[in-house]
Image: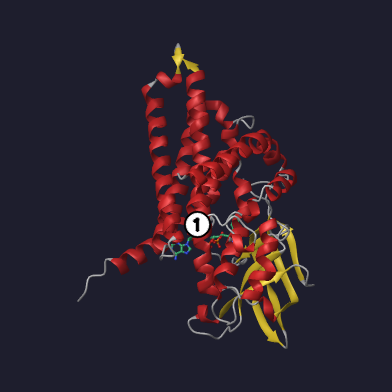
Amino acid sequence: MTTEQREIVGMVGDFVEREILPVAHDLDHDDTYPEKIVAQMKQLGFFGFAIPEAYGGTGLDYATYAMVCEEIARGWMSITGIINTHFIVSFLIENFGTDEQKQRFLPRMATGEFHGGFSMSEPNCGSDVQAIQTRAIRDNGDYVINGTKMWATNGEHSTVVATLVKTDPDASPPHRGMSCILAEKQYPGFTSSRRIEKLGYKGVETTELVFENNRQPAANLLGEVEGQGFKQMMAAIEVGRVNVAARGVGVAQRAFELSIAYAQQRQAFGVPIAQHEAIQFKLADMATKIQAARLLTNYAARKKDAGERADVECGMAKLFASETCFEVVSEAMRVHGGYGFSKEYDVERLYRDAPLLIIGEGTNEIQRLIIAKGLLERYRVSG
Ligand SMILES: Cc1cc2nc3c(=O)[nH]c(=O)nc-3n(C[C@H](O)[C@H](O)[C@H](O)COP(=O)(O)OP(=O)(O)OC[C@H]3O[C@@H](n4cnc5c(N)ncnc54)[C@H](O)[C@@H]3O)c2cc1C
């Protein structure tokens, strides 16, 4: 880490110890939105972390952003979800938005006044993004949007939702007829209709979004040209994959820390269980895999920072870190024995949070397809 990275990650780590870890258990069990934590994060500039300094943010590179996400997830994974969609949207605007859109949205997003959401999934499709049905029709100076979106993280608290729509349903292939609209809640006919009850990832809401003859100004089309939405969203989702990979590392790290402490306190057969070789092997495997996941995540983030194609690296990081996290929380539960199954212990929360990482930001089956496609291009045999 550079000195600057050390300072930022240290500041976030202190915040996690002081403000998040002591309340995470209760907020999770009550499924309560962490209003106080979010207000403090706004004050401390967290909502501007990955937004360029020119627009009032801190301009962190993605490698540092990943370290920050790891720290936060170590405290409570749901908080990383609150900033994830926010920075996916700021990435979209920074990289594909018009100057007017950058000026209008980014400074307000950097302070947290505006909160970004990101919506591709629909009730009938998630992995198969090109099958979306939500339609936007140009009408004078507006787009009229109709359709239902599903699984929108921050669906209630977001002010602006980068929404994937079809502007030309007859386009072939379908992705050429897809556009991204920066849909603002202030325009009638756009509502967060219901919250989805979840196994974990509590506190942060995941909702259905309904567009009923919702008129968004044409100036809210991301960029200037229709038909770019799919490509824009696919580039942005790599930022989300870095976030999810870092979450996996953070949740797993917490599970490991709890396990290695517990193993030295809990006695069985006259000695701390940490002296039993079977437990030592678990701890060794956990720590080794977590470190491997951390390095893969860092590598993917640095590729994204370099502006290079990073689909394979982000896919690998997301795949490996989320599977590692799933494995580590399960091993942590074994180390804790019966207490791991108790709601009084944090391992139970980590165990409920981990599976989302396998599904969100593209399932791990889809990551494998992306990785394989990229590898076959790189290692193409001619003739
Ligand atoms: C808590 C939560 C928060 C979310 N937040 C957001 C959000 O903010 N914005 C958003 O847009 N979406 C969000 N999602 C949606 C998420 O991205 C999708 O759930 C995910 O992409 C999978 O889509 P699906 O659920 O429709 O599963 P499906 O696409 O129906 O897949 C079902 C199964 O089939 C497999 N499968 C599908 N196609 C293939 C294939 N070609 N080859 C092999 N296997 C395949 C999948 O891997 C999976 O195992 C969220 C989801 C959850 C659970």
* Residue 163 percent across, percent down from the top left: 63, 70
**Any part of residue 82 in sight:** no
Please state which amino acid type lies under the numbered disc 1.
Answer: Arg
Is 77 displayed left or right of 1 in the figure? right
Residue 14 falls in image quadrant: top right
Residue 349 versus residue 138: which sits nearer the camera?
138
| Residue at the disc numbered 1 | 241
Q: Which residue is drawn at the image coordinates 46% and 53% (left, top)? A: 318
Tell me: 335 left or right of 166: left
| Beta carbon at label 1 within 8 Å of ligand 1 | no
Residue ID at (78%, 72%): 187
Quarter of the picture for ligand 1? bottom right
- Residue 85: percent from the left, percent from the top? 61, 59
User: Image height check: is 280 above or below 366?
Assistant: above
Categorize mark 1 by other alpha carbons within 10 Å: few (<14), some (14-19), many (20+). Answer: many
Q: Up-down: is 103 above or below 367?
A: below
Residue 377 shows up from this direction: yes
Q: Using the image, determine if residue 202 lies above or below residue 174.
A: above
Instruction: Report the side of 378 relative to 323 (left or right).
Output: left
Tag 1, which secondary structure? helix
Q: Does 71 sit above or below residue 66?
A: above
Q: Position of residue 230 (x, y in %)?
A: 53, 73
Quadrant into which the N terminus falls: top left
Q: Give percent across and percent down for residue 223.
A: 59, 77
Q: Quadrant of the C terminus?
A: bottom left
Determine the residue positioned at 59% across, 40% down.
11
